[in-house]
Image (cartoon, grey):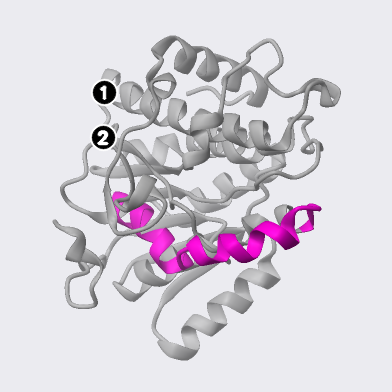
Amino acid sequence: MSNTIFTSNNLPDLSGKTIIVTGGNSGLGAESVKVFAEQGAQIVMAVRSIEKGEEVKSTFLKVCDDLAIDVMQLDLTNLQSIKSFAQQFKAKYTKLDILLNNAGIMIPPYQTTTDGFESQMGTNHMGHFALTGLLMDVLSKTPGARVVNVSSIAHKMGKMDFNNLMYEGGKNYNATKAYGRSKLANLLFTFELQRYFEKNKIQAISVAAHPGVSQTNLFKFAADAWYAKFLLPVFKLMIQSSRMGAMPQIYASIADNVKGGEYYGPGGLREMWGYPTLVKAKDEAYNINDARQLWEVSEKLTSVKY
């Protein structure tokens, strides 16, 4: 299936598919929800704010009134909320074809989640690690299921430090480096999850994608920085739309030629923009020892055992 999958005439029929999109009420998540729903899938829009999720859903329904979108509450900064969401999902649905772990935050000041995790690692990695594990039983019972984790080109600046993974008490905290670490964690998790599927003979695949440089609400913290008024006008000339930014994760979710352990991003200059293509993460993302250690630490900290 080529890049033309994203033209209006070549999108696959998704009727009968059940898809969860975390952070589905804005940016890349909303674009993904819209595409999937228009192709007939049953969408679960997993969002922190039910009110905001319903608002976005209503705008979609004004254009097409037969979309199947179920808005459910999920706060990735709270393990109890994640457990509650997983229980409610499994009470309503018996299959899960695609879990798109899309939600995330970027370069906030140092803060912690409800469970004491550094907010970026807690939201971007730990929350999705816990969610995926709690949904593993339904994923494993759905032949051909996919888990798609959204990373970033910023993973290239990430470095794992298991001695201070969460920047305890703000020690040596740098918002940009912490974001890069969380996005590197997304990739380490993706590749280790694929090995988990293969080892346990589960008919599912784990894939990663990144949006390049795209228009999303992730930049809300950057906009407050002192340098924003100088750099953002230039940055906006380089940025692509959220629709284009969502294409790699949409492709990774539904293209029939996608294989487990692959990573997709924009095919343009330095992967900043363009149509989706197979890309390569930095070497550290394929470090098996780091991946296993991150998995073990994640199970311990979230109390979610795979």
Residue in the picture at 59% in, 40% down: 124
Residue under numbered circle 2: 260
* Picture coordinates of residue 269, whole percent (x, y): 35, 50
- Of the image marks 2 and 1, the number of the one nearer the N terminus: 1
Q: Nearer the viewer, residue 38 or 265?
A: 265
Residue at 46% across, 14% down: 292
Q: Quadrant of residue 126?
A: top right
Left or right of 58, for residue 141: left
Q: Name the residue that disc number 1 marks.
A: 198
* Mark 2 residue element: loop
Out of 238 and 146, give the one closest to the viewer.
Answer: 238
Please identify the dominant SS of the magenta region.
helix
| Residue 163 point in image, percent of width and height | 69, 10
Q: For this view, does 295 lie left or right of residue 120?
A: left
Instruction: Kindly indicate the quadrant of the structure image that contains residue 107.
Output: top right
Image quarter hosting the N terminus: bottom left
**Looking at the image, residue 82 lies above or below residue 41:** above
Q: Do the residues under discs 2 and 1 have CB atoms within 8 angstroms? A: yes
Q: Which residues are magenta?
A: 224-252
Q: For marks 2 and 1, give the CA distance.
A: 9 Å
